[in-house]
Amino acid sequence: MTDKTYSDAEVEARLAADLPLWRLEDGWIRRTYKTSSWKGTLMVINTVGHLAEAAWHHPDLTASYAWVEVRLKNHHAKGITDKDFALAKKIEEVVQWQPAREGEGLEGTPQSDLRFSYVKYDTPN
């Protein structure tokens, strides 16, 4: 049984509604995470790797010193499926998590000190 694939228009609509920082490009949904250093890049890669393995749905990754690009599509279905959206949503939730914004005692990594800074968040701390 093959997973339902979405048309480009359907993908664009879902991204706009649920994952506005992701984009459709060359048949993949993509997101580039900016990091503060190689340490942060490796942490993002390991986080994505853990989530992908737990989901049993694996993205393609490209990385450099201060960024990681995550690309998702369902190779078996030859397109974008619900699996891609679900994994993208979980990756976004975990990588962009800012504990200080929840007000439950966790302060999060100091963004002003590069020794500790991790991800360059797309929303203010």
Image: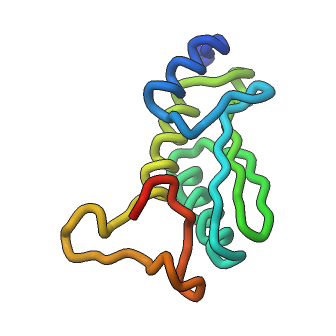
Q: The N terminus is located in which quarter? A: top right
**Residue 73, quarter of the rendered image:** top right
Q: The C terminus is located in which quarter? A: bottom left
Q: Position of residue 8 (x, y in %)?
A: 66, 14
Count how many numbered circles sit on residues in the image: 0
Please say if 40 is above or below 124: below
Q: Using the image as rendered, state which of residue 119 and residue 63 is in the foreground.
A: 119
Answer left or right for 104 relative to 94.
Answer: left
Q: Using the image as rendered, state which of residue 109 and residue 111 is in the foreground.
A: 111
Please say if 1 is above or below 59: above
Q: Residue at x 31, y 77 (%)?
A: 107
**Residue 35, quarter of the rendered image:** bottom right
Q: Residue at x 51, y 26 (%)?
A: 16
> How has the structure been colored for display?
rainbow
Q: Using the image as rendered, state which of residue 35 and residue 53 is in the foreground.
A: 35
**Residue 59, quarter of the rendered image:** top right
Q: Position of residue 28 (x, y in %)?
A: 72, 31
Answer left or right for 79 relative to 110.
Answer: right
Please say if 119 is above or below 96: below
Q: Position of residue 34 (x, y in %)?
A: 64, 60
Q: Position of residue 124 (x, y in %)?
A: 42, 59
As drawn, the residue found furthest toward the bottom would be 115
As drawn, the residue found furthest toward the left would be 104
Q: Residue at x 54, y 41 (%)?
A: 88
Q: Residue at x 53, y 18 (%)?
A: 13
Answer left or right for 42 relative to 112.
Answer: right
